[in-house]
Structure formats: structure tokens, C-alpha cells
Image (spheres, rainbow, N blue to C red):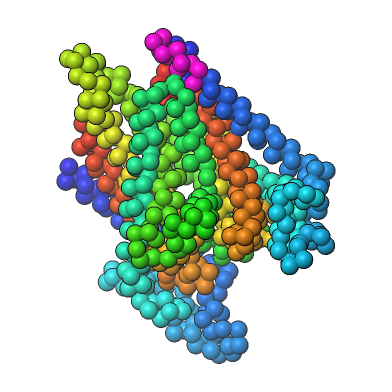
């Protein structure tokens, strides 16, 4: 187990190194020139060269990359070109709202998805099942910006139940969290449905029924816990999809998280911020996958760690 | 699902739902055919030119016209006919959906087959690279690349392909590596067949069902991704209409003219849904590993 963990940690570190290299390389070869953005249009050639030198952008690629990695080892992610603030502190300030939003999004996704899946499995083959499965298809086919705008229009503009955007209270959180949750709920509904159907077929369910337990008790105490675990174990793998969704949802709702930070940085070619957010997201994705792989055998002993 | 043997006799309704699922696929297919026909015949079926700013396309106050009347789905902020823009936009969405997905499929299949067949270091390197791509926040990467490259239609397609081949590569890899150990491949090798011949004539045909299924489901993903990029303003650039950038152009007005957002939005949803429904049914029919299981 320790050896496995160690190997996975080394692998994860290598993956992150690769992500940092590729991102750095892509941003290095990009046609947009960050120095022009900083200097402004009126700047003379001399000013442009000075800024380029100051930022170390006149160095060869390898030198720049190694310098960046060196900083990273000491927790220094560089400074934003335009805001002059340290990227690490910018990200640290934006991380709590994003984590809150993601946690709420995962909560919505699980509540919606698992409920739909369980009901569909119990009503298998009936109209409710078909209806729920169609709903799950619609949920995974709806672009998140459209869901955001639809929820905004209905619940904020028309009904004024929730604010149009912003951050601060519980009411601000509801619409963006539901938006994030809807996409995943479709996948969870389908996984939960098949997991539940499989469990309901198992011998121990028949035994429980034969003992004379009520249907409700069999479902709640015996079937549900067994069916739900393998589905819950998928959360770790979701992180990547969430990281993407966050960019769109945060920009529509004006949620001050790292998605919005990244989006603004991309528009202004603020490379250190783009680098930082990409790396933080990649860390989250790698950690999510690692956790998913580690808890899988704990949940299902048939899966052995190799 | 497609296998009649799994019908549970105690639940005859199960067969009905199975039929319903395939009815859904037929519905999806019909949607795809209609949208594709509209896209191909755009110059014939669109009532107006997509970029014509009609002189009577705005109210006297200068706001867009709601649906109904001369302009069936209303007009946009510049007085252009929304229906015509959506019909022409179907071209963009379908071209990008199919081109991007085709490229992704090609890359994914190539990487998957090579990595799955040649175990050794080639396979290891390719699969580690695939793992690496999995760790990228895909949408963030796509937005970043698209924003930087001042996108044209083909650049957008390329960007989408570059972030989307990974899933296919993993699935194809798993299948190829199990095929590579099968007896018929060993037999072929003993007979002296070249590697190219084994891959092309014996491995690839076995992968066709998987490629078809992932190809269909993948179009849905690429359509959604294109819409998202265009909605953010980094995808297909106006005045070329795409369903995403129609929403991008008009969203500031969406409180007073919601149809400008929700009609193209519905088109995106419908197309993505159609490909998902068809892809899912194809998986039921074509994927032997799912036969007998009830998802």
C-alpha cells in the first residue's frame, strides 16, 4: 500500500511537471505579446524592450522555464503582469469562493442525480423511468451557459427570487450551484440507476424480502447503501469537468472565483495568472483522480490495489 | 439492451422502455437529418440573408422584433432575421462538430491503436502522455488556445480536437491491447503478416463499432464546446453566424429580448441531445460488452 501510494505520488508529480511544461510552452509560442499589453499602444520601442527585459521575457525559453520552476518550488508563482500582485496570493484570495461553489455544485449534482437514478430504478420500465432518463439526456446535452442564462431569466429576472449575480449570501450561491449540478446530475442519474438495478437483482435482496422485511426497509437499509457507494466514488473523477464548468458559470454569474480570474487573465494575456490557475486546476484534477483510485478498493474489496 | 434474451418476463414493460429508447434514437436521427438538411440547403430555405440588416427589422425605438410576423423567430439587435441566422449557423455548428470530432477521432484512434499494440516503451510513453492530457482542465485549455489564436473556423475545430481526443484514445487503447493478445492476431503473426497488415486488416475492423459509437457521442461534445467558446467570444467570430455567437452578440439584451438567447440555445441543446440519443442507442446495439447488461 505504501509502495503503491508512493508510486502514485511520484506519477502525479511527473504529470504536473508535464502540465506545467506544456502550458508554459504554449504560452511561450503564442502569437499574442504580453509586453505590448502591459506597455500600452503608445509605448516606444525602448520602453517595450525595457519591460521585456525586466520580466525576463528576453531570456531563452529553457531559462525562463527553469526560473519559473525554481520559483514554484519555493511557492512563488510569479507576479501578475498587469495587477503587479503575487499570483499565489491572487489565487489564494479567489480559491475559497470557487471551493464553496464546487462543494455546493457537487451537493446539487448528487442530490438531483441520485434521486433521479433511484426513482428510475425503482420504477424501471414505467413512464417515470423513461421520463427521468430523457431528463438525464437533456441535462448532459445542455450547455452550461445556456442553463445559467435560463435559470437567471426565470428565477432572477422574472421571479426575482434570487439576485442576478454576485457573491456573499446563500441566495447568491443557489443558481450557480444548481447550474453546475445539472450537467453532472444526468451522468449520476444513469450510473445510479444501473447500480441500483444491479443491486436489486442480488441474492441478499431476495433474502431480505424473504425474511419478511418491508419493501421500504429493504430499499433504504439494504439496497441503497450498496448501490450508492460505487457511484459516490466517481466524485473524484468529476473534478476536471467541474474545473471547466467553473470558468463559464463564474463569468455568467459574476462569481469572484478562480474561473473568473482565469477568464480575465486570458483576455488580457496575463500569463503568470493563466499558468497559476492551470496548475492549480491540474493539481485538483490529479488529486481527485488519486483519491478516487484510493477509495475504490475500500468501497469494493473486489478491486485490488496493484 | 438490444438483446432480447435479457427481457425480464416478469416485467414486460421493460421491453416497452427498450423500444422507447430506440424511438428516442429515431427522434434524434430525425433532428439530425432536419438540421443537416437546413444547413446544406441554407441558401434555399433561409427566408433572408443572414447578415442583411433589414430596414424594417427593428422597432421605431430601435429594439429587436419579437417572434411572429414577417420575421418568424424575430430579429436580432441589428435587425437581422433570427431564423435565417440560425439556419446559416447550423452550417458552422455542424462543420465544426464533424470536423473537430473527426480529427479528435483520428488522433485518438491512432494513439490508442499504437499504444495498445506496441506494448513496450512506445505504448508507455503514449499512455503517460494521455494521462497528462487528462490532467489538463480541458475547457480552460480550449478557451486559452482559442483566445490566443484569434480563431477562424478551422482553428476552433483544431483546438476542440486537441482537447477532445483523449477519451477516445483511452477506450481504443483498452480494446486494442486486449485484441492484441487474442489468438487470431498471434496466428496472423505466425503466418508472417506484416504489422501494418495486422493493424489495418485485423485490429482496425474490430474497433469500428467503438469508433462509430464514440464518434457519434463525440459530436455532441464538440458541438457543446464550440457553442461555449463562441458564447465566450473566443470561438467563431461574427459576422459568421454560429449558434454560440448569436447568443454572445445578443446576451446584453437578454432580459428584454429573451428569444435571442433561448431560441439559438434550444437549437444547440437539440443538436447535442440528438447526437447523444443516437450514440447511446448505437452503443446498445454495437457494444458487445454491454450486451446482457441493463443500463
Left or right, residue B6 beside residue A42 = left
**Going 58% across and 69% down the picture, which residue do you hit?**
A31
Which residue is nearer to you in this view: B81 or A19?
Answer: B81
Q: Please determine whether, in this image, residue B70 is positioned above or below residue A59.
A: above
**Residue B237 at what x, y percent from top left?**
66, 60
Q: Please determine whether, in this image, residue B245 is positioned above or below residue B36.
A: below
Which residue is nearer to you in this view: B125 or B238?
Answer: B238
Left or right, residue B22 beside residue A115 = right
**Residue closest to the far top:** B9
Which quadrant would residue A170 be assigned to in this image?
bottom left
**Going 40% across and 28% down the picture, which residue do you hit?**
A120
**Residue closest to the far front:** A159
Q: Is residue B185 magenta?
A: no
Which residue is nearer to you in this view: B10 or A94?
Answer: B10
Q: What's the magenta region?
A: B6-17
**Residue B53 at what x, y percent from top left?**
79, 61
**Going 35% across and 36% down the picture, which residue do you hit?**
A115
Amino acid at each position: 500500500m505504501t509502495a503503491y501510494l508512493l508510486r502514485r505520488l511520484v506519477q502525479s508529480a511527473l504529470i504536473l511537471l508535464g502540465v506545467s511544461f506544456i502550458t508554459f510552452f504554449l504560452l511561450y509560442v503564442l502569437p499574442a505579446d504580453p509586453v505590448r499589453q502591459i506597455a500600452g499602444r503608445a509605448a516606444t520601442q525602448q520602453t517595450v524592450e525595457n519591460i521585456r527585459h525586466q520580466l525576463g521575457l528576453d531570456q531563452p525559453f529553457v531559462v525562463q522555464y527553469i526560473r519559473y520552476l525554481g520559483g514554484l518550488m519555493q511557492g512563488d508563482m510569479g507576479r501578475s503582469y498587469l495587477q503587479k500582485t503575487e499570483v499565489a496570493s491572487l489565487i489564494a484570495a479567489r480559491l475559497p469562493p470557487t471551493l464553496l461553489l464546487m462543494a455546493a455544485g457537487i451537493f446539487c449534482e448528487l442530490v438531483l442525480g441520485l434521486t433521479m437514478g433511484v426513482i428510475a430504478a425503482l420504477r424501471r420500465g414505467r413512464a417515470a423511468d423513461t421520463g427521468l432518463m430523457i431528463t438525464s439526456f437533456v441535462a448532459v446535452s445542455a450547455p452550461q451557459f445556456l442553463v445559467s442564462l435560463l435559470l437567471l431569466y426565470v428565477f432572477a429576472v422574472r421571479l426575482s427570487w434570487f439576485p442576478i449575480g454576485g457573491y456573499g449570501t446563500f441566495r447568491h450561491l443557489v443558481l450557480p450551484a444548481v447550474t453546475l449540478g445539472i450537467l453532472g446530475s444526468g451522468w449520476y442519474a444513469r450510473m445510479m440507476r444501473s447500480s441500483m438495478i444491479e443491486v436489486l437483482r442480488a441474492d441478499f435482496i431476495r433474502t431480505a424480502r424473504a425474511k419478511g422485511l418491508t419493501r421500504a426497509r429493504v430499499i433504504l437499509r439494504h439496497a441503497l447503501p450498496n448501490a450508492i457507494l460505487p457511484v459516490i466514488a466517481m466524485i473524484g473523477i468529476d473534478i476536471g469537468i467541474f474545473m471547466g464548468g467553473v470558468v463559464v458559470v463564474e463569468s455568467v454569474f459574476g462569481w469572484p472565483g478562480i474561473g473568473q480570474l482565469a477568464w480575465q487573465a486570458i483576455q488580457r494575456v496575463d500569463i503568470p495568472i493563466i499558468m497559476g490557475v492551470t496548475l492549480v486546476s491540474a493539481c485538483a484534477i490529479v488529486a481527485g483522480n488519486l483519491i478516487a483510485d484510493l477509495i475504490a478498493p475500500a468501497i469494493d474489496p473486489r478491486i485490488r490495489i496493484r | 439492451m438490444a438483446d432480447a434474451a435479457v427481457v425480464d418476463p416478469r416485467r414486460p414493460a421493460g421491453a416497452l422502455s427498450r423500444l422507447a429508447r430506440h424511438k428516442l434514437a429515431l427522434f434524434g436521427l430525425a433532428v439530425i437529418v432536419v438540421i443537416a438538411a437546413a444547413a446544406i440547403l441554407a441558401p434555399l430555405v433561409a427566408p433572408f440573408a443572414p447578415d442583411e440588416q433589414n430596414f424594417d427589422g427593428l422597432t421605431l425605438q430601435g429594439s429587436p422584433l419579437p417572434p411572429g410576423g414577417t420575421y418568424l423567430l424575430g430579429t436580432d439587435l441589428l435587425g437581422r432575421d433570427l431564423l435565417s441566422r440560425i439556419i446559416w449557423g447550423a452550417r458552422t455548428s455542424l462543420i465544426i462538430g464533424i470536423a473537430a470530432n473527426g480529427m479528435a477521432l483520428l488522433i485518438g484512434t491512432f494513439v490508442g491503436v499504437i499504444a495498445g499494440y506496441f506494448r513496450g516503451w512506445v505504448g508507455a510513453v503514449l499512455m503517460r502522455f494521455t494521462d497528462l492530457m487528462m490532467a489538463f482542465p480541458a475547457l480552460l485549455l480550449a478557451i486559452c488556445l482559442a483566445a490566443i489564436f484569434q480563431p477562424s473556423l478551422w482553428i476552433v475545430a483544431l483546438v476542440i480536437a486537441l482537447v477532445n481526443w483523449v477519451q477516445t484514445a483511452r477506450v481504443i487503447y483498452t480494446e486494442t491491447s486486449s485484441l492484441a493478445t487474442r489468438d487470431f492476431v498471434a496466428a496472423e503473426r505466425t503466418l508472417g503478416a506484416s504489422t501494418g497488415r495486422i493493424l489495418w486488416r485485423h485490429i482496425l475492423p474490430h474497433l469500428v463499432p467503438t469508433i462509430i459509437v464514440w464518434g457519434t457521442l463525440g459530436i455532441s461534445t464538440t458541438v457543446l464546446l464550440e457553442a461555449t467558446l463562441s458564447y465566450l467570444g473566443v470561438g467563431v467570430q461574427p459576422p459568421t453566424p454560429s449558434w454560440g455567437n448569436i447568443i454572445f452578440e445578443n446576451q446584453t439584451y437578454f432580459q428584454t429580448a429573451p428569444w435571442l438567447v433561448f431560441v439559438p440555445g434550444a437549437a444547440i441543446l437539440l443538436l447535442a441531445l440528438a447526437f447523444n440519443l443516437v450514440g447511446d442507442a448505437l452503443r446498445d446495439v454495437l457494444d458487445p460488452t454491454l450486451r446482457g447488461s441493463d443500463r
